[in-house]
Image (tube, rainbow, N blue to C red):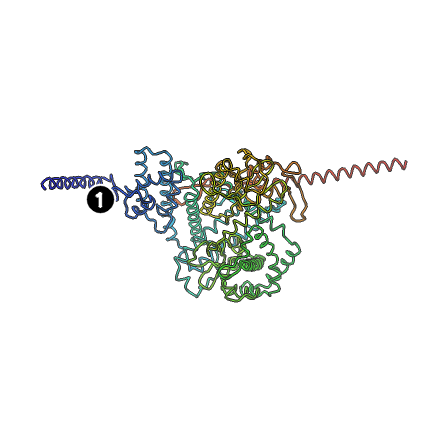
Amino acid sequence: MDNWKDKHEEFMKLIEETTKLLDEKLKKGEITQYEYDELKTLDFEFDEEKDSIELFKEFYIERKPIKCSELLLVIYDKHKNSFRKAVLLSECFPDPLGFKYSQEIHEFSILIINRAFKLAISKEYPKELLIELKQLYLALNFFNHNNLRNTEKLNNCDFMKFSLSEQIRMLFIFLQDQDRLVAELRKKEIKKQGFFTGMESAISNKCTNTNLNMLISYEDNFEGILEAYDILIRYLYFKKNKDYKNKTIPEHGDITHIRIPSLELITKLSIQRNLLIRTWEKFKYSQWNVVIKNDNAQDVYIFMPKVEEEYKEHIIASNRRQYSLMLNLFKTKDTEMVHESSRIISKISGEINKDDIKTLFLMSKEDYLIAAESYQTMINAYKFNMHSYYLELAIEGFRIEDIFRVFELLHVLAKCYKRAIYKDFDQEDNAWYKYLCPIVPIDYFIEVLTNYYGFAKEYSLKLIKCFTFESGIKGESDIFSRPLILVNSDNIVFCPILMQQINLERIIEMLLSNFEVNIARIGKDFENRIKFILSHFSGIKVNTSKIEFLASDGRNIEFDFIGTFDNHLLLWEFKAMTVPYSDKKHMECKKTIMECIDQIERRSHIIKTDWKKIKELANIELPEKPFADDKIIKLVGTNIFDFTTLVYGENIRVVDESTLLKFFINPEVKVMSLNDKKVLNSKRLWKNTEPTANEFIHYLENPITTSPYMGCIEAFPKAFDVFEDDYPFAIIDQILTKDPYGQEIENSIRFNKSSLADKKSKRKKSSKHRMKKRKKKKK
């Protein structure tokens, strides 16, 4: 008993000494309050059977930095190269741009990272972990600092003194006026250029007013402002909730965006916030890296892609989608119908009273339907790139086809109103700017949709709601896809350019996502369509029987696509996905691609061990022995452009549908005049009447669908404008510096002019020669 008492006293004395030591360290600032509190518990163990990420999150909430720092090392042991992704995607650390992120949370996060860094050094962990911990440290410090200052300026901005309807209206008057000015500039530029490719607005050849070293395109500038306003309007809805609920809209008078300093300030703040959000998403989802470089005695945070080629292909894909839509549009263009539609639109616009917006909605059904016809071409251009399955769907009681009716309605209304206002617009008279974006009751849209298409009023309301941006909106929705911006529950701001920039494919994919529609069928449809098309090409033998069995590695295996071509085995996997407009979606698509890569790698190994089974199950002729590795063409085929030409794993290349089929089905490459369909130049992808495997492999390395961009796109450091107390930052972007199709067209036009001149010269000489002969005969 005395022995136990002595031990107890000894233990209590040890606790007392430890507490005194901890008190001294806390007082000297050698440890933090968090570390002090955790050390006093003398509880340093954790359940190693539990998931390390879930444990980390538990201890984070309990504010136990010692256990959290140790768990970061455990997480690294498990995830290795995917450490950062595992930590950020599971939200071990709170989002530094989130509303709930505070200085206290930030300091605690930094404490954990610092402790983990020291612990990793003492335990001799790989340099890779130290680099990733430093990345987290730099990123959290940067985003926290700039976010706090951005939020503070946003809250104190005088723009908040305006009513909600005035705020939203001023924002979109500014946007619409930008469109008006840019349209005039582009018209002059295209006239000077002498031809139109459709890529002009994507070329980064403009400097900003505040930064002469920054190169941007019209498209970048417009999309940047839209993204910023998407964030800002959500914030205004939150701050001006009372205004939103108020049925009455205050009188705006001659409202304008000109000489409103607070509008300029809040636009800059919103653009900055958008840049912070987009850069954080690149760091979080696309694993971008950050470094600090000293520039003129100032530390600049520079963010750059981890894999430059992936980001480059993503940017090229965006431009290819735009160009593809433009080509489809011109291919199906009916010039006669466009002229008739334009005539009717001019007639309607002449009947609009700018002081009475109701007159826009009074056009006759007959006139409207003629005006809407020209937009059927645009809808068909979108349909050409869209999954046919989408067109069969009915979601929450409405048909996808009827979404197209709203699309054409908004386009007709926007076109008619723009033409009416722009015709006599006086930019020197401030009273004119209020006409750019009037306030319109949402009921006007419901009424005309009902009248023009014979829908029930309730059905029209349901359709219009798919295009309406409102307070508290959830899911995948933004002002790009929902251009009818509510200023209160009954009225929207009518912004023509917002309606005209709608991406129809994006709207439908967002609707399918929001209503959680199962679109698994598009994958099988996609695969079957490619098989069907290629099976009709004489040079390829496509297996159509089911190849599935228990493989020699003890697992079931299925070969989706096996074929032969020019003594080569085609080992392909096809996947259909939705277009990745965000870094998060791009990450999800890459995950799908990598799963395909794993499948192909396994199949290529099974080919060596289980060839006899494969040969028995296939319905195409295969050799007795398996193909050598250099005789196997391994591909992942997709319906999106974002990974085309990239190579992963064991020399497995990614290719999109249009690039693949271009080689086999449509090998002619033509430069054509879209007005008269005249071929200016052409070349073939094969030398002879049938292609070879070597030609195909060479083509995949630099296909005609992406090669025009390679010499026109380059890495460019974009240093963004910041406020005086912000940390300066930049990104290494990929920008289009010249028109990828411009040089080819210029050369073709020059060649045709030269050929025409030669022909004229030869005809002239021939004519002179004949005249001389005649004169000789007369003599």
Asked whether 515 or 766 is in front, the reply is 515
Can you give x and y, in whole percent of width and height, for residue 317 in the image?
53, 44
Q: How many labels does the image show?
A: 1
Can you give x and y, in whole percent of width and height, for residue 149 in the image?
37, 47
Q: In which quarter of the image is the N terminus?
A: top left
Can you give x and y, in whole percent of width and height, for residue 172 in the image?
49, 56
Going by the picture, which residue comes out furthest to the left?
Answer: 2
489 sits left or right of 455 in the view: left
Whether residue 212 appears in this view of the structure is no
Q: As shown in the figure, which amino acid type bears the numbered disc 1?
A: Thr
Element carrying mark 1: helix
Task: Say few, some or many: other residues with alpha carbon within 10 Å of mark 1 (under 14 / 14 to 19 / 20 or more).
Answer: few
Instruction: State whether residue 471 is above or below residue 216.
Output: below
Q: In which quarter of the image is the C terminus?
A: top right
Q: Quadrant of residue 279?
A: top left
Instruction: State whether residue 481 is above or below residue 282.
Output: below
Q: Quadrant of residue 770?
A: top right
Name the residue beneath numbered marker 1. 41
489 sits left or right of 148 in the view: right
317 sits left or right of 667 in the view: left
Can you give x and y, in whole percent of width and height, for residue 80 in the image?
38, 38
Asked whether 438 or 605 is in front, the reply is 605
Whether residue 383 appears in this view of the structure is yes
Q: Residue at x 35, y 41 (%)?
A: 75
